[in-house]
Image: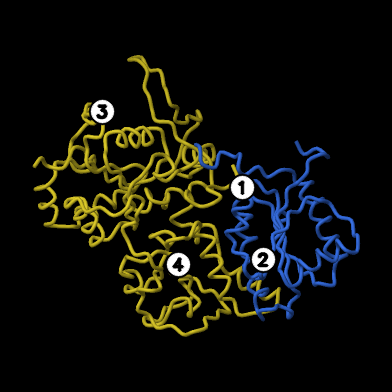
Amino acid sequence: MDKLKFAVYWAASCGGCDVAILDINEKILDVAQVADIVLWPIALDFKYKDVEALPDASVDVCLFNGAVRNSEQEHMARLLRAKSKVMVAFGSCACFGGIPSLANVSTRERIFQRVYQDTLSTTNPDTVFPQTTCPVPEGELELPEFYDTVRSLEQVIPVEYFVPGCPPPVDLICTALDAIATGQLPPVGSTIASEKILCDECERERSEEKTVRQFKRPWQIIPDREKCFLEQGIICAGPGTRGGCGARCMKANMPCRGCFGPPLGVRDQGAKLLAAMASLVDSEDPTEIAEIVGQIKDPLGTFYRFGLANSVLGRVKP
Amino acid sequence: MESADFQPKIIGFLCRWCAYLGADLAGTSRAKYPPNMIPIRVMCSGRVDPTFVLQALADGADGVLIAGCHPGDCHYQSGNYRAAARYALLLEMLQQFGIEKERVRLEWVSAAEGEKFASVVAEMTEEVRRLGPLRWNRTEAVAP
């Protein structure tokens, strides 16, 4: 049998997903045994023209990590889509937009202004901003176009499978790789994780009725190691987040931040979390209610930390 | 575009026990109010998931009205308190999205308050008309 052909690509991402693939340790040797890697920019020296030269649908699987924020990433997403039989959105950024999509609170113009002009360490007296083309004596230079809005992979190209996580945990990567290697793939559109919410796999103690009179920020409290974070007044994204991560953060005494995205059947993770947090408020007095929910600083950033691109509203009004 | 003939589209989520009956009373007592609000009957203001509000705005509504029972009168004891807390937090978040808080309104309307219902809808219609169309579905929210 011919070896499988694998591609791994990164777009708007931090590189953590690529490192997570290496975290499967010696299992990577099994992968090398069944598969040839045709593109993996962080680890191997292939060029884009090598990918362009491949016949369409000749790559068996592409693991695509990172969101799409510029024209180069969009080009590569479309190119790899054409070359790949199976496209996997790998990691929270590819799945939902991730941390990079928090930039959807801003615009290209404001980001450029901040980065190339306003920051204290920047000196730019001629107001030089990146251009898509730039004439130089040797010819014309090109840069990718920086978009106003960051998108998830699925908002750009059709995607077969989703492996969430920031980064995806090793056991889920292995599950996905095994499924690919043995050809026993789940139905198209599946997310390789739990179908339940995170709270279902969290081992912390909880009572029937949760009530909060004060939302606490991290510096205001040393969390109890055994008790549900929400019952301590600490914002935890568990009720609005898909399980499957093994509650790793909770075991390290950190509340969930929501990197596995919305659970099955939930359209908008942020709205779900907003409803869940507001429902904890233990007051019937309008002034007091406003005061308690007012303790939640930056609800948009907190509830859409990993999913602003995929949210119903998608971005802040430009 | 914010001309006087702009007709705002307002989605109203009305509690089946109070506000919806208030709307009925407004009708039977021939109270006059603008036709811009499209009512959707829900079992309780507490049933209104914030997703409903966001989806309405994203799909072309210019405003959303949520109307339920007065505090203490909820048919399910505490649904309207839940609605109140979610609404307070939702307003904070909507403003971060750049959506004016006047576009989403929570009101308590009892089954006996037909007049109040009519004046709430009239007032809100004018307020949203003044703000102009939201046009969220036509912003470049998804296309770069």
SS label for mark 2: strand
The amino acid pointed to by label 1 is Asp
Identify the residue at the far right of this view: B30
Same-chain check, marks 3 and 1: no
Name the residue beneath numbered marker 1. B59
Residue A110 percent location from the top left of the image: 54, 40
Say which chain tag 1 marks.
B
Q: Work out how far the residue at label 3 is from the one at label 2, CA to CA, in angstroms.
A: 54 Å
Image mark for residue A118: none
Asked which quadrant contains residue A242, the reply is bottom left
What colour do you see for chain A? yellow
The amino acid pointed to by label 2 is Val
Name the residue beneath numbered marker 3. A52
Left or right: B23 in relation to B139: right
Name the residue beneath numbered marker 2. B42
Same-chain check, marks 2 and 1: yes
Q: Residues within 10 Å of mark 1 (few under 14, many from 20)?
A: some
Q: Work out how far the residue at label 2 is from the one at label 1, CA to CA, in angstroms.
A: 19 Å
SS label for mark 4: loop
Q: Nearer the viewer, residue A150 or B29?
A: B29
Image mark for residue A237: 4
Left or right: B110 in relation to B134: right
Coloring applied to the structure: by chain
Q: Quick one: label 3 or label 4, which is nearer the N terminus?
A: 3
